[in-house]
Image (cartoon, rainbow, N blue to C red):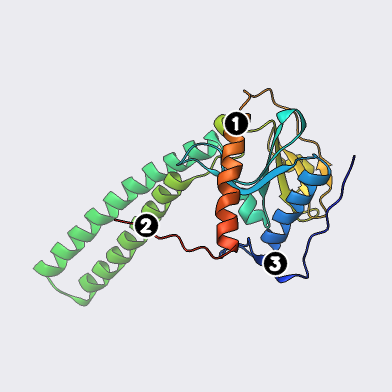
Amino acid sequence: MSTFIELPTNSSAFTHFKNGNETALTYSLKWAAWKWLWEVAECRVIGYEVRLEGPFGRIADVVGLGPENRVYLIEVKSSRADLSRDDNNERTQKKLRRKEKSLQAAAELTTSVLATAKSAATASPTSGSERAVAIAESDATRITAKSASTKKRIETLSTKFHDPAYLRCADYHYIMTPHRMIRTTELPDQWGLLNERAETVVEAPLKQVKRVTQHVLRAIARANTRDLMKACEVDVQRTK
């Protein structure tokens, strides 16, 4: 029998599970994802911020377990910038590594030029030599900062939408976005699309993944226990 749920948007209880760094739009989209999982996918076990890849793995925004033990994974994206952060692949990684290599070479060159300019200024101080040092320092600082920024981006680059390991975590993968924020042609392969009205825009293909029901149930249970304790303001203290 089909059932429907009404979200308590006018109740103070509605904000109990909101993370401190979440926008109101992101939070409402997560509830829309919950509504879709309940009403459309007929999931009766649902959790927020569920870690499916082990204690140090990535976290899925919303996960549900439906009929036939099918696992539904939904990533909530409230802006195109948020979407693009996870939409990287091997080509992006290779491009960034080439860029990092070039910047490292440029950083070494500007550091060498700076050392030469300082040496010349010490040997024969003039207004021209001081200007040369200032320019060389500016170039070295700028290139070094760009090199460090590129290195950091490589270290934190997310390939969530294209990672085979992440795609093995669920039978169905969906992206939930505001209505018409993303064109259907922009969807990553193997992903479906939902909108803020809890409607299916593009059906996700069924993947033949290994049955991980017990693992998923445990992960959702942990997430729900955490959220319940947070909502009830239970204070957890660690002992030494």
Q: 224 or 27, which is in the foreground?
A: 224
For label 2, the residue is: 238
Residue that lies at the very extreme toward the bottom in this rendered image: 127
Tell me the element at label 1.
Answer: helix
Which kind of residue does numbered mark 2 sit on? Arg
**Residue 34 on image: x %, y %:** 74, 50
* Residue 3: mark: none
Q: Please state, as top left, top right, bottom left or bottom right, where the N terminus lies in the image.
A: top right
Badge 1 density bin: few <14, some 14–19, many ≥20, Cα 10 Å: few
* Residue 85 in view in this figure: no
Q: If you read the primary sequence from the N terminus, does the residue marked by circle 3 or circle 2 appear first?
A: 3
Q: If you read the primary sequence from the N terminus, does the residue marked by circle 1 or circle 3 appear first?
A: 3
The residue lying at 58 percent from left, 29 percent from top is 164
**Residue 146 on image: x %, y %:** 40, 55
Residue that lies at the very extreme toward the left in this rendered image: 123
Tell me the element at label 2.
Answer: loop
Which kind of residue does numbered mark 1 sit on? Gln
Which kind of residue does numbered mark 3 sit on? Ala
* Residue 82 in view in this figure: yes
For label 3, the residue is: 13
**Residue 226 on image: x %, y %:** 55, 53
* Residue 214: mark: 1
